[in-house]
Image (cartoon, rainbow, N blue to C red):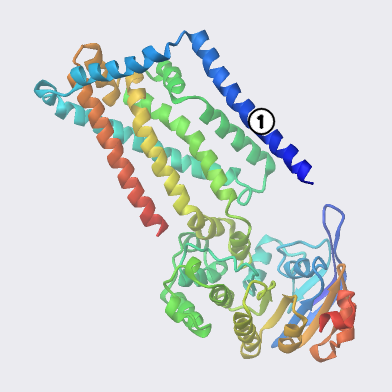
Amino acid sequence: MLSVRHLTKTYPNGKKGLQDVSFTAAPGTVTAVIGPSGAGKTTLLRSLNRLITPEQGTVTLGDQELRGADAQALRQARRQIGMIFQDYNLIEPLSALENVLQGCLGQKRLLPGVLGLYTKAETSHALALLDEVGLRAYAAQKTRDLSGGQKQRVGIARALMQDPKVLLCDEPIASLDPQSTRTVMTIIADLAKARNLIVVMNLHQVGIAREFADHIVGVNAGRIVFDDNAAALTELAAAAIYEKEATALA
Amino acid sequence: MPNAVSVMLHHQRRVRWGSLLGVVALVLASQVVLRVNVHQALFGVVAGWAWLGAHFAPNAAALADLPEILYQLWRTVLVAIAATTVAGGVALVLGLAGALPTSHLKAVRGLVRLFASLMRNVPFVAWALILLFSFKQNDFTGFLALLLMTIGQLTRAFIETLDEVGPGPIEALTATGATYWQVIFQGVLPAVAAPMLSWLLYMIENNIRDATLVGMLTGTGIGFIFDLYFKGFRYASAGLVVLAIIAVTIGIELTSNKLRQVLNA
């Protein structure tokens, strides 16, 4: 279980990123975080693996508390938390296989990690993951030559290389066409079930959130304004999250 | 509205003609101050080339000096390559300390940028003259002069290259639990390897040319024997030195262009 309690983040310019945010996410489920631009979705997601450090509250994964963890403990915790990004954040001059292998850097000792020395087992595992996301044939291809949807699938395989308990997805479909959107969302939703993963993802599309998520958290101005299962997200509830007329979101 | 457009066009025309007249006036004024006669200079250039052709064209006697010229050229190329590669290593460390995505200490970043600026703004000729006092006339003095200037140039270039990486790939690898050095070696350096090597090759080309001039000052390499032949009125041999330098720099340029193509493929 991933448990977030009373998370608060204020930026140096005084802007409230998060205000007393609490929710839980269970294994085998997809939790979608929705809300208008600037609502604090990205701040929330990045606070979960402490790419951003909140000043108050707790993030607990199992029995491990992340917000107060020292550098060593934080690195260990991050090994269990895979992350995929809107802009993929791949090392574009490297091949798909090399990018996927980088997912296990956190589990390697310093020198082999620095030199990029991967074992046969790690390489076989990376190839299997590329196969799982349908990109086995592209293993040797440089990622700069892949399409957006393919790059995102390499990003997913890199995150899975960590063998994570949690998968954080920061706007994973924002840069994709409708067909790639469905492919990527189906892969993520299936992975959550098949691997018993805790998936937390930021989304802009309410319809996609309803279709693929089990649990929806609505955020506005850094506060949680909705926290329920996906079926409970009515037009009216969605409109309240976005502070719009219900018809505007249809 | 059309009136506003016509006023704007009129203003643009005035600025254009004003700038042109300003440049012409500046050229004429500098000719008067420097007492340059354009007509004489133009015909002087033709006569100068004719004189060069007559005296600097290599002859059979000059060809006897070819083995020595090639040996000195080889030493010069080695000095340039050694200075550039050592400078590249130092500049990589300084670049990581001075670039925003890889260095978190603002004061360190500022110091590195200041150091790079100081190093690259002292011309290599000045470095060579300063170092001559301490290290005397030898290859090492030339090596040091090129090294110091190249450290400044490459540090600045590497900082700018690293600044362009952006936080994305660094964030992605940090999120896997990778350490700082793992992120640098597996995330940052692969992303910037091609442009950095491109800079290194460019500086090797430049330093081969500059090493010739440094050699004249430090009494070593191809620069020294060019000076020797020239001052000894052995113009044909000096001409052969110039041709050899041109051939080697073109060769190095073609090779580095090919390497760049391979790196960017």
The residue drawn where x is 68% and y is 75% is: A168
Q: Is residue A1 visible?
A: no
Tell me the quarter of the picture where residue B97 sits.
top right
Q: Quadrant of the C terminus of chain A?
A: bottom right
Relative side of A177 to B92, left or right: right
Q: Is residue A152 visible?
A: yes
Tell me the quarter of the picture where residue A248 sits.
bottom right
| Residue B69, horizontal then vertical, whole percent | 20, 27
Relative side of A226 to A102, left or right: right
Q: Nearer the viewer, residue B129 or A209?
A: A209
Residue lying farthest to the left in this orientation:
B60
Q: Quadrant of the N terminus of chain A?
A: bottom right
Q: Amino acid at mark 1?
A: Val
The residue drawn where x is 71% and y is 68% is: A49
Q: Nearer the viewer, residue B29 or A229?
A: B29
So how many labels did they put on this image?
Answer: 1
**Image height of A93 relative to B234, above or below:** below
| Residue A172, horizontal then vertical, whole percent | 66, 74
Relative side of B49 to A155, left or right: left
**Image height of B203 relative to A29, above or below:** above
What residue is disc 1 on? Answer: B15
